[in-house]
Image: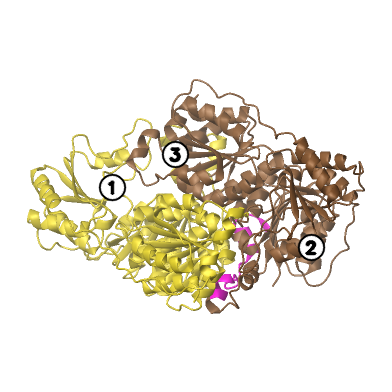
Chain colours: A brown, B yellow
Amino acid sequence: MNGADAVISTLADNGVRACFANPGTSEMQFVAALDREPRVRPVLCLFEGVVTGAADGYGRMTGHPAATLLHLGPGYGNGIANLHNARRAGTPIVNIIGDHATYHRKYDAPLTSDIETLARPNSLWLKVAETADNAADLAAEAVQASYGPPGGSASLVLPADCAWSPATRKGPVLVAPSRPAPDPAKIEASAKAVRAAKKPVVLMGASACGEAGIAAAARLSAHGVRVLTDTFIARQPRGAGLFAPDRMQYFGEQAIKDLEGVDLMVLAGTTEPVAFFAYPNAPSVLVPEGCAEAELADRREDAQAALAALADALGAPTSAQPNALSLPDRPSGGIDARTVGLSIARHMPEGAIVSDDSVTSGAPILAATRTARRHDWLGLTGGAIGQGIPAAVGAAVACPDRKVIGLTGDGSGMYTVQGLWTLARENLDCTVVVFANHTYRILGVEFVRTGSGEPGPAAASLLDLGNPRIDWVSLAHGLGLAAERCETAERFDDVFASSMGNKGPMLIEVALD
Amino acid sequence: MNGADAVISTLADNGVRACFANPGTSEMQFVAALDREPRVRPVLCLFEGVVTGAADGYGRMTGHPAATLLHLGPGYGNGIANLHNARRAGTPIVNIIGDHATYHRKYDAPLTSDIETLARPNSLWLKVAETADNAADLAAEAVQASYGPPGGSASLVLPADCAWSPATRKGPVLVAPSRPAPDPAKIEASAKAVRAAKKPVVLMGASACGEAGIAAAARLSAHGVRVLTDTFIARQPRGAGLFAPDRMQYFGEQAIKDLEGVDLMVLAGTTEPVAFFAYPNAPSVLVPEGCAEAELADRREDAQAALAALADALGAPTSAQPNALSLPDRPSGGIDARTVGLSIARHMPEGAIVSDDSVTSGAPILAATRTARRHDWLGLTGGAIGQGIPAAVGAAVACPDRKVIGLTGDGSGMYTVQGLWTLARENLDCTVVVFANHTYRILGVEFVRTGSGEPGPAAASLLDLGNPRIDWVSLAHGLGLAAERCETAERFDDVFASSMGNKGPMLIEVALD
């Protein structure tokens, strides 16, 4: 048993079942060890942004960390954007970052880099192994640390000699920490504030949006308290049988308008809402003037139990009328995000998982699927586009019996297009829907909102994806994936229905323009 | 004039002529300002690894920094791998990293991240603007700082309000620093050591490999001193009329064997050579036992002038017989890296630029082009694959009158495949040659070398790109690029000859397997 064996078996002993990998020379011992540890499934990705996004999708669906395998500082660097999203989602992930042998680092070989500094901002735990036995101990610590709460990336730097040197033992099995129970004082204060308020709202963060939290939110809603979620939620169960809270609006002025007259905001597993971006002469904080705030549970605490306790304290009904299943009719005519949303709602099977990176196309689909069959929705938590395809990969690995639907814009899809190959290679049960509007549409909107006027030729060229037009069917075929382009609502309805009826991966290009 | 105008005009005043960009909302004011500053050419890339790799290729060819435009921490993160390569190459680059408005950062909005920590490892200069006028001053400082010596990334974090607030003035025009003149004491000591040595070698680093340095090396060679370069050189002029120094071998044991009996190593613009990776029971330092070392010039000093001074001090011939033009015959039969190299040597036009990320296919092409028409060769300086296509983009923007040839493996090409779209969009005069062996071949070699035995099924799956096979012709078509697959040496010779005769971008897939 060498250090790599000890690390991978310790990860497995602590519950790790998948390793999304893009290895290099310094990780070869770890790769070899994967052959000797059948409990961990290796999944090759052609780019590290796919590796980390897949680990995020996997962790959101299982609640447990996958391992990533990354090649020194540059490999980790390529994975940063999706680790940023995972940090915002609170997803447990264990990064194994290969490094030069301990004695080799001082020579500053070409791939030497300051991994610790690079990894610090997105790691809630970060250590560097010094020996094989130490590496095994740290592997156990990393898994435990990744649970937080709230969860996040634990990054273990694994020098090559720690992997290839003999290990005398595996690391321990450590207990995963759980969230602190709700604070009775906060519950009492929140209940009192709600009773006194004229127009209270409850704002739910990611940790509040489990099934129990949604059920408690339904009770609060039945009691007359409006419930919203943060704009982007790591994982939200939705559809028939489940209460559907509203969302905080993305644009600040719309959010402020939506909250007009609200005099109390109760925060459940989240913090004071703020604008995604600042704009000249627009507020940063999205709480109406004079509105009081009450923290029911912070991001660490068990916000779901806190919501249930608040409902109890308020004497809310013990059960609430659930959302009934209601599917739309077949859409027809020109294709757009609205008609696509209707078709998705019609055909998405029970238990589907939606990985959403669709940017400007997302809202109509969220609206259309409110009463669809029950599903989970994975949002773009950190705003770093390029999450949709990778998170779909990870969700499909995590849940092989559930259909995964990846929604992506064309701009966002290009960031991590390499994920299509892993969908094909692993024959994952996933349909990727690309909204091809051949522009960074959101930036066209934001350009005006930031007070930049109308784009001139240079600016317009930086917002345009239409020259040349990206042919997503060719791209998908090049990466081994079946694909279709749909130019009418009817055609999309047929193709999407068919993809929902078949197992395996495919891509559908929605020709928006 | 707002801060963005002041920054971009200050960059232009200080010689910046291109901005490789992948902007987001926080950069919209900068995008708008590009319309008002016609001296700076905006080039959109669909992924930040292409942005930074293009800036590296541009900087290597012009000697001046391009600007990059990156979207907060995640956007910068996506660009880190190629900035790592640029750091190793000593390439001047000015990164403009957009950030939230100064007053908005404290709210920890979803895209907020610790940009300064992320950017520190690969930045030789890093500052955060605080006002519009301050941003303009810092833009001038950044350009100056990017020159080093040695050159590197200067990173300016530009909060959105510094961009949109009124500026009262532009920043100054600052003088670019030059390299320190050679140190007479080092020249004298090196000359004395060479005279005393039985088997001296001179090792040239990137900064030594300009035309003057190569000419001085030719004189040393004519005098009987063997001259080598580092394994990976940022930019090396090669071909007919130019002396072709040997290269340090990539694998340590081959390097040590190649240097057998060497009793003096003179270092010109580089440091003691070390192995790219450590291996069990293999040395890190690639200097033979008992070999003395003499530093002629460090990485900061003018190593080219130092080499000329050393040649003078040794009484080397004042001119040396140049490499005569010698082109191979048309290859035939099965296609491999050797036959491709022969065709490249035959047809590559005078002044071509080769951007090399071909990994295991590179050596035969280097050998074949030694006496080809004069060209520049851009090497993979930092070992972070995914440099080839982006650096070709940047070189083609920098040198519109020269043909660019991008060499890439299929594994390395997939990291930054998005660069193909920019080649098409800008109609750059570049032919990308993809060596499609459907495997991470280098890792198959390294797996064995690291003592990992023979790959089992799990390990083999992590080294294999063949399931599914990537169809590079479809991929290229999907991104708007003409493409051909070549399965014989003759076919490649014809297609490559044709692409050299036409202006504009195309991709050739070399079907190796």
Task: Judge by depth and name the residue closer to the eye, A427 or A274.
Answer: A274
Name the amino acid, label 1.
Answer: Met
Label 3 crowd (10 A; few <14 / some 14-19 / many >=20):
many
Q: Which quadrant would residue A410 be assigned to in this image?
A: bottom right
* CA–CA distance in space, label 3 to label 1: 23 Å
Both labels 1 and 2 in a single chain: no
- A365 vs B473, left or right, is right
For the record, the magenta segment spans A459-482
Tell me the residue at 61%/46% (across/down). Answer: A87
Task: Identify the residue position indicated by label 1 in the image.
Answer: B248
Image mark 1: chain:
B
Q: Which residue is mark 3?
A: A99
Looking at the rendered image, the disc whose residue lies closer to the viewer, 1 or 2, is 2
Residue A463 magenta = yes
Above or below — where is B165 with respect to B391?
Answer: below
Specify the subunit that label 2 lies on.
A
Q: Quadrant of residue A420?
A: bottom right
User: Between residues A423 and A188, which one lies in front from this camera angle?
Assistant: A188
A465 relative position to A180: left or right: left
Question: Among all residues in the image, which is located at the extreme top?
Answer: A168
According to the image, label 2 marks what residue? A260
* Label 2: which secondary element: loop
Mark 2 nearby-residue class (10 Å; few <14, some 14–19, many ≥20): some
Extreme left residue here? B315
Disc 2 from disc 3: Cα separation: 53 Å
**Secondary structure under the numbered disc 1 in the rendered image:** loop
Depth order, front residue of A369/B198 = A369
